[in-house]
Image: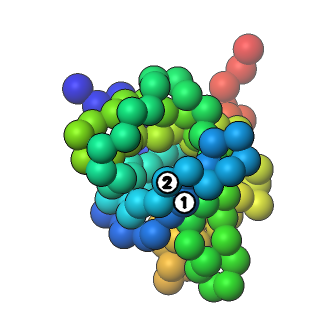
Amino acid sequence: MEHRCSIRKPVAVRVLIYKHGLPVQSGLSRDLGMGGVFVVTGAYNWRRNEYLEIEFAAINGVKLRLPALVVHQREKGVGLMFDTITDAQRQQLRAILFPSGGGHRERHAVDDTPSRQVA
């Protein structure tokens, strides 16, 4: 059963996976959402909860590198959940997911959620 925090879209973008600031593997995203990505990498032995960074190929001349945690490893790739990302990174991610400007509505839906939570 899926436990994702956001909907995923089929998006194929070239990516680089970094560990300790160094590029260690390349791949292609299979699906992408505001909360994470599945990257087709081929066989590789990532550990669950391992901290990585993922860099998306330049889109509109800008590269996007996001911190991520390994959620699961499969034969053909790795599922990553984005870790703490900035507002600027979130906007860049939306530009990848909604290239025609449809991310504006999504931003409001995502940004409104935390304000409803009262501790």
Q: Looking at this view, name the residue that lies furthest to the top.
A: 119
Crowding around mark 1 (Cα neighbors within 10 Å: few <14, some 14 to 19, many 20+) is many
Tell me if I can see residue 69 in this picture: yes
Residue 25, label in figure: 2
Quadrant of the rendered structure where residue 113 is?
Answer: top right
Q: Is residue 106 left or right of residue 1?
A: right
Provide the secondary structure element on which disc 1 rests: strand
Could you tell me the amino acid type at mark 1? Leu
For the residues labelled 2 and 1, the Cα–Cα distance comes to 6 Å
Q: In this view, does 13 lie to the left or right of 64?
A: left
Residue at left offset 41%, top offset 60%: 27
Quadrant of the rendered structure where residue 103 is?
Answer: bottom right
* Mark 2 touches mark 1? (CB < 8 Å): yes
Q: In this view, does 65 lie above or below 103?
A: above
Residue at left offset 56%, top offset 72%: 57
What residue did someone put label 1 on?
A: 16
Q: In this view, does 43 lie above or below 56?
A: above
Considering depth in this image, is 41 or 37 the residue closer to the camera?
41
Could you tell me the amino acid type at mark 2? Gln
Q: In the rendered structure, which disc, 2 or 1, sits on the residue that comes first in sequence?
A: 1
Q: In this view, does 40 lie to the left or right of 26?
A: left
Q: How many numbered marks appear? A: 2
Tell me if I can see residue 113 in this picture: no
Crowding around mark 2 (Cα neighbors within 10 Å: few <14, some 14 to 19, many 20+) is some
Residue at left offset 39%, top offset 63%: 28
Q: Where does the image place residue 25, in percent across and percent down from the top left? A: 49, 54
Quadrant of the rendered structure where residue 1 is?
Answer: top left
Considering depth in this image, is 21 or 3 the residue closer to the camera?
21
